[in-house]
Image (cartoon, rainbow, N blue to C red):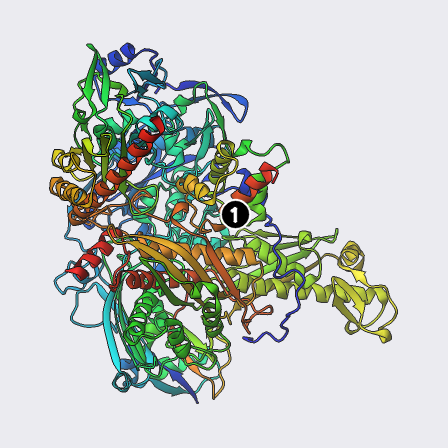
Amino acid sequence: MTKQHVTASVNGDATEFLCDAGDTLLSVLRDDLNLTGAKEGCGSGDCGACSVTMNGRLVCSCLVLAVEAEGAEITTIEGMAEGEVLHPLQRKFIEHAALQCGICTPGILVAAKSLLEKNPNPTEVEVRYWLAGNLCRCTGYDKIINAVMDAAAEMRGA
Amino acid sequence: MQYAAPETATQAARLLAESSGTAKVLAGGTDILVQMKFGAGAPDLLVDIKRIAGMSDITPEDGGYRVGAAVSGAELGEHKGMCALWPGVVEAFELIGSTQVQGRCTLAGNLCNASPAADSVPAMVAAKAVARIVGPDGERDCPVQEIPISPGKTSLGKGEFVASIYFPARPDNASDAYLRFIPRTEMDIAVCAAGVSLTLDADGTCIDAQVSLGAVAATVLLVQDAADALIGSKLDDAALDALGVACSAACNPIDDKRGTIEFRRDVTAVLAKRAAKTAQSRAQIRAGENA
Amino acid sequence: MALDQDQKRDFKIIGTRPLRPDGIDKVTGRAQYGADQSAPGMLWAKMLRSPHAHAKILSIDTSAADALPGVKAIITAADFGDMRKGEAMNVRDHIIAKDKALYDGHGVAAVAATSETVAKAALKLIKVDYEVLPHVTEIQAAMDPAAPVVNAGFVEENAPKGYSENVISAYDFGHGDLKAGFAKADKIVSRTLKTAATHQGYIEPHACLASLGADGRGELWCCTQGQFYIRELCASILGIEESQLRVTASEIGGGFGGKTTAFIEPVALALSRKAGHPVKMVLDREEVFKASGPTVSSEIDVKIGMTKDGRITAGEAELRYQGGAFPNMTNWLGAQCAFAAYDLEAVRANAINVLTNRPKQAAYRAPGAPMAIYAVEAVVDELCIEFGLDPLDVRLKNAARKGTKASYGPTFDDIGLVATLEAAKAHPHYNTPLGENQGRGLSCGFWFNFGGNTSVSMNINFDGTVSVTEGNPDIGGSRASISMMAAEELGIPYEKVRTIVADTNSIGQNDVTDGSRVTFAVGLATIKAARGAIKEMCKRAAQTWGIDEDAVVWEDGHAKPAGPNAGGFEPLSLAKIARKSPNTGGPISGHHEVNAEGAGVSFGVHLVDVEVDKETGFTKVLRYTVFQDAGKAIHPDYVEGQMQGGAVQGIGWALNEEYIYGEDGKLQNAGFLDYRVPVASDLPKIDTVILEIPNPGHPYGVRGVGETSIVPPLAAISNAVSHCIGVRMDELPMSPPRILKAIKNAGD
Amino acid sequence: MVKVAIWGSLRSATDGAAVVEVEAKNFKEVLDALVRDYPGLEAQIERGVSMAIDGVIFKESWFAPVKPDSEVILMPLMAGG
C-alpha cells in the first residue's frame, strides 16, 4: 500500500502527513497528528463530535478523506483558544455548566464558533437548528444554548 | 483503494472508464464515506472531481443557473440568484443532513447516490432540471429524472459522471416548494416528500405545474395527475383535495423502519397540499416584487 | 447509622455554582477519553461478529487470518478458561460467543494487528461455520411454549409455569387485599402498555487501551463507570489477580448505566497477553448499538381501581421484560417502582423476566422504573379523565408520604413527593391556557437511589491546600461537588481543593458510579474524611498550645480555643497547621471507608405541553418543566443538568427512540441516523424547579438526582399526546405513524 | 423475634406466609435464620438479597442492626444505573 503525502495547514501551522487513501481526516488528526480533541461518536456524520472547519466551512472530519485536505486550511478545537486565553465560547461553556461528560463539547464549540462567524446575532431557534447535527446526550441542550447566546452577546459587545 | 484528483473533466472520465475494478466519483463524500465505513467498503478507485475547474461554480446561463457538481449545500444556500429563482430546490437541498453535512454535500451526489429518499431530487425533478454528463465520449445533457433508475443505481454509463445541473429560467409569477416528513426536526431521512413547482397567470390561476414525490417508490415520481389537479385552479380546497388524492394514488411505498405504507400514502398527500400552497404564495410574492 | 447525627444546614459553599475543575480541559480538547490514549508498540483490535441472531458455531478457522502480515493475535471463546457461574461468566459469554451466537452482533473472534486496516482485513479471512437456529426477539414469541430456547439453564425455582424455558423468573411485591380494594372502586381500568428497548446513547463508544504481560501484571485504561468492577470482571474472566491489574478510568463520554459493565476490556487484555503488545480497542457506533447493553423492552398489564372522588382503591401490574439472552435485575426493580408514588392499601406488581435473541441489557438510568411508572401513570391519567378530576389533585390525594408503606415494602421516612406536586400545582406552567391541537400531561417519577462501597482519602498539603482522592469516574461534574463538600466541611475556599479520580491501586474499593450514588456516598465519605482530618488538626493545635485536645474547636477553617477557659490563643488556620505539620507529627490526612446505606429516595414530577400535527402525527414539545426533590443541591447547575438531561432522554424514549428488529432477527437501525435521539432543534427550554427535602441519611441532606428525571417523561408525554388527540396512546415510542394511525382508527 | 416480610414469589418456601418470624439481631442473622427455617429460600438468598430495615435499604451490610420491633423487608439485590 503506497502512502499519500499531504500538505495542509492545521490550526495555522504548516503540516505534512502520510496517509492511506481511505483514511479519514478524523483518523489522521487523532492518530497521526495527536489532535484528539475531535472525537469519533458515530463515523457517519450523525453526531458532530468530530466537527472541524475546512477552508472556513464547518464539516464532520469523519466524512472527509485525509487526502482531500491537500492544500486546505483545517482548524480544530485545539486551535480555538489563544494560548492561555480562552475563546469567549469556551469561557461561557464553563461558566454556564454547558457540559457534563464533555465528549460532545469540542464539536459543539467548533460548530458554534462557525455559526457566530456567519451570524453574530442568532436567535435561540437559529442556534438550535445550526447545532442540530451535534448530539449531546447529557445536558438536554438547555445550558449549551444559554452559553452560546451569552457568548454571542458578549462578542457583539452587548 | 486508489485516489485520484484529476484537474480536467476529460481526465476524470478517462480514469473512471479505464478502471478495471469498482470506480466511484467523490464530490462531497457524505454518502460514499459512510458506505465505505459501514456498507460495501472502499471502491478500487475514487475519483475526486473537486479539483476540476468550474465544479464549484454557480454560473448564470440563459436566465437560469448552472450549478457545478461540487457546489455544497451551504454554498447554494448563500446564492441569492438561485434562492430567488428556485427556492424549492434550495430548501430541499438545505434539508439534507446537518450544518456540517451542508458544508460538503452536493446536488450531483444526492442525485447519483440514487436513494429514493434523496431530498433534493424531487425538487430538481419538479424544476425540470437537466444534468450535464461528462463521459469518455464527451458531454451530454439528461433530465435529472432519468438518472436514478432504482435504489442505488443510475443510468450513467461507465466512465460517465454528472458535472453540473442546469436550472432553467422561469416566469416571474412562478415558484416552487419542497416538504418532507421526518420524525424529528432535523437529521433524518425523509419518510415521504413532495415537491411542487408551479406557474400562475396574471389573475392567479395555475397554468403550469409539476408535482414530484419522494420516498414513496423506488425512484422519485413525477405525477401528472397531481399537476393536472392544480392546473386551471387557484388552488382552492377542491383542487388541493384532488391533488392529495392523485398523490396518494400515485404512491407505491414500502413498510420499513422509517414508516408504513399507510402513513406514507396519507402524509404524502398532506405534504403535497402544503407545498403547493407555499409555492403559490412564493409565486405571488415574487410576481409582486418583480412587477 | 442511617440518621446522620451531625446534620449541617448553614452553608457557605454548598448551593453556590463554582466553575468545574475539568472545565478548561474539556473545552480545549485536552481531556483524555477512552480512545484518546496510545502506547508505544500498540496494536489495534477488532471483533468479528455474528451476522445471525441465533446460530450454533460449528467451527472457527483463523488460519488465513493468522497468516496475514501484521496480525499478531487472534482469540475466540476457547482462549478463555472455565469459570464459576455467575454474572462475570454471563458478561464474558455476552462479549464472546461460546457454543452459539445468541444475538445479531455477538462477538465470535477478535484480532489484534498492527493497524485498524489490517485488523479489519483479517476479520474477513476468518471462516466461521454456523448452523443457523430459529430465533426469537420479541416478548410474546419468546414466552410461547414452542419458542426456541435462547439460553438454557437460567430458570429459577419460582419461574411461572406453562411457558418456554425463556421465561426464567418472577418477582412479585405488594400488600393488602386486592379483591377488596377493587370492590371499593367506582371504576376499574385495565390496559396493556408496551415500551420499546432503547439505548443509553452515550456519544463516546466503548474504548480501552490494554496491556497485560505473561506474568499476569496489567494496565488497563478505559472509559467506564466503575474501574473497580471492570477490574473484578477482567481478573475473574482472565484468571488473574486483582492486585496485579491496575485499571484507570479515563474521562468518560457519557454512560447513563451503559458503562457499568464490560464489553471489550477482557478481549483487549486477552489479545494483549497473547500478542505481547499493548492493544487498543474501540467500538464503532454500529457495534455499540448491536453489542453493548441497551435497556429492556416491556409489556405491562395494569389494572387500577378508583373511587369517583379520586381515591385509588387498588393497583395491580404484571410486567414482562425482555433484556436479551441473559438474566437481569431490571425486571424486579421495575416491579418495585411501579406504584412507588402512591399510598395504597392494596397493591401488587409482578415481574416476569424473558430471554430473547438480543444483547444482554445493561442498566439505563433508573433501570426498570421508566416503563413501569409509564404504564401506571397512563392508567391513572385515564381514570382522572374518566371522572373529570384534576390529575395533580388526584396524585396529591394518593401521594406517598412519610409513614406510607411503600408498594415495595418499607415505610417511607421524609420524602418530597407532596412538596413536588404542590410546587407543580402552583407553577405558572400548570395554569397557562393551551392552544388548539395542544395537550398537557404530567407524571410522577421515582427512584430508590443507592449508596454502596465507598472509599475517599484526603491530604492536607503542606501549603494549606487539600487533595481529595476518590474512586468514582466523574460522569457529570462530581469532582466539583466533592471539592465543594470538602471545602465546606474544612471551612476553606473551593479553589483550595482539588479532587481526582484515582486508579484501582491508589484508593480503596469503590462501587460503580451507579444508582445516583456519587454525590450521596462519595460526598458522605468526603465529609467524614474531612472530619477525620479536622480532628487531627485540632489535636496539632492543642499540642502547639499545650492545651487539651477537647479544648479546641474547628470553625471557619481555623482551630480555635473552645472558650475563654481554654486560653487566649490566636486561632490557627488550616494553612498554618499544615505548614507546621512536619514539626507537629508529620503529614495530616483524612480518610473514610464505608458501605454507605441510607440513600434517600427521590421523587419528581414532570409537566409537559405538546402540539400534535393531526395530519402527520408529528409531536412538538412546546414547554417542559421538571420538579424534583434533590434533598440538598450541592452544585445547582449540575443538579439542573441531571434533571434536564434525564428529561430529554425520556422525551426521546417517548417519541422516537427504539430498537427495531427485522423478521430475520437483525437490528435494523444500528446508527444515530435511524436510532433517533433528540437533537437541539427538537426541544424547548427545559425548566427546572429544585425542591430540597433533606435526606436524613446524609450529613448535608443530599439525595441522588441522576436517575429519577428519566422516569416521568414517558407517561407525561404520552398523557399529553393522548389528551391532545383524544385517543389513549398505549405504546412507546409514539412515532408519527403510530399517532396518525391512532387518530385515524378513532375517526373510523 | 423479628417479623420479616417475604415477597410474593418466595412464599412457596414459607408455606404461603407473607411474614415470618425469626430470631435475629442483624441483617446476617436474619438471612441465616431464614435459610435454616425455610430452606426453600436459600436459592434466592444465594443469588443475592437486600433488606429494608426501618425504611432504610441495606444492600448487603451484614451487621446492620435489627431490633425486635424493626420493620424488616426482604428485597432482591438492589443496584442501579
Instruction: Work out whether residue C465 or residue C81 is closer to the camera in this orientation and state it.
Output: C465
Task: Identify whether C304 is placed above or below C555.
Answer: below
Q: Which chain carries label 1?
A: A
Q: What residue type is labelled 1?
A: Asn
User: Does residue A40 appear in this view?
Assistant: yes
Query: Residue B208 at x, y = what percent?
Result: 18, 30
Q: Is residue C246 in view?
A: no
- Rendered location of residue C44, percent (x, y): 39, 35
- Label 1: how many residues lie within 10 Å, few (<14), some (14-19) or many (20+)? some
Residue at position x 57%, y 62% from top?
C523
Residue named by callout 1: A146
Judged left or right of residue B274, residue C497 is right
Report which quarter residue C519 is drawn in: bottom right
Residue at 25 percent across and 11 percent down: it is: B14
In this rendering, the answer to whether B9 lies above or below C358 is above
On the rendered image, what quadrant is the N terminus of chain C found in? bottom right
Q: Quadrant of residue A3?
A: top left
Q: State the residue at coordinates (15%, 71%).
A: C162
